[in-house]
Amino acid sequence: MVQLDAKKWVNNYGDMLYRYALPRVNDGEVAKDLVQDTFLAAWRNYDNFKGEISEKNWLFTILKNKIIDHFRKSSTRLTGNLPGIADSDPYFDEAEHWTSVSAPLDWKTDTDSIIDRKEFYGVLSKCKGMLKEIQNTVFTLKYIDGLESDDICKELNITTSNYWVLIHRAKLQLRACLEKNWFLK
Amino acid sequence: MISCKEATDFISRKEEGKLSFRQRWQLWQHLAVCSFCKLFYKQNKIFSNSASHLHEHTNATLSQEQKESLIKALENS
């Protein structure tokens, strides 16, 4: 058995893993628990660590699996909350046109000036955290992890029509939240 | 003519090439005349693309307390 140093591990990798998990789950407690589970799993299975990849990459691989497990579990828990067609819609009127309060405004900004702004990401992350958990999950898998919709449906065991409704709602809500909290400030 | 609700949905499907030729045509026809959906189209790109950079822009850290409890959890396992 290799001599393991818990303090060194946590100090070297703790924040790095936490920063990976946090924007995905948008919940500090959950992110911390995922990091803890990752360390524990790695600690117990250290004998299986072959050194073919770096210790850091090995920990990230474990964390990624923990995150997807977390998403899977929460999607099972939230299947009852999947949006129905009859749900009220704050964005569009009966003719499915934008309602006057929710129609997009011109942000009068070009992309390049935003993507360097640290504060923008703070607002984006806050808005993302306000999504329903299942919406946040599909948005994360799609736009942070770059998965295709078919794979997301398989991972979360949801139908494609559910997926498109979830991603549509997530984007409408994110857009409105960003407009209110960033562009109109 | 498709509605704004459909058009905004089509925009996400288009990103993955999931629109038929007819649907693509319907979307372009809608965007040509609807300034709101045209804005949505642009803004969608901004926040969807920047999502993948979120982690580079966070300086969140575990608190010293959390770190100590992690170390304890490891040492006791």
Image (cartoon, rainbow, N blue to C red):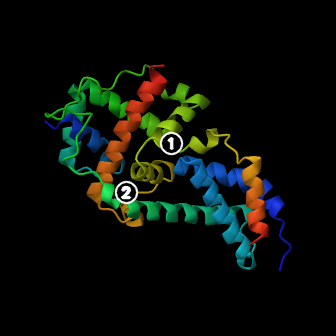
Residue at x 35% of width, y 47% of height = A167
Task: Please state which amino acid type lies under the numbered disc 1.
Answer: Ala
Image check: A68 left or right of A35? left
Q: Is residue A62 above or below residue A121?
A: below
| Visible residue check, residue A6 | yes
Dot 2 falls on a residue whose secondary structure is helix
Figure quadrant of residue A33: bottom right
Q: Which mark is residue A181?
A: none
Residue B51's disc number: 1
- Give residue B61's quadrant in the image: top right
Cα separation, mark 1 vs mark 2, equals 16 Å
The answer to which of B19 and A174 lies nearer the viewer is A174
Chain at tag 1: B
Q: Give a yes or no on whether discs 1 and 2 share a subunit.
A: no
**Residue at figure coordinates x 56%, y 46% from the top left:** A23
Q: From the viewer's side, name the closer residue of B22 and A34.
A: A34
- Subunit ID for the residue under disc 2: A
Q: Amino acid at mark 2?
A: Ser
| SS at mark 1 in the image | helix
Taking the spot 42% from the left edge, 65% from the top edge, the residue there is A155
Disc 2 marks which residue? A149
Q: Residues within 10 Å of mark 1 (few under 14, many from 20)?
A: many
Q: Position of residue B74 (x, y in %)?
A: 75, 67
Residue B64, x across and y down, in percent: 77, 48
Residue B51 coordinates in the image, percent (x, y): 51, 42
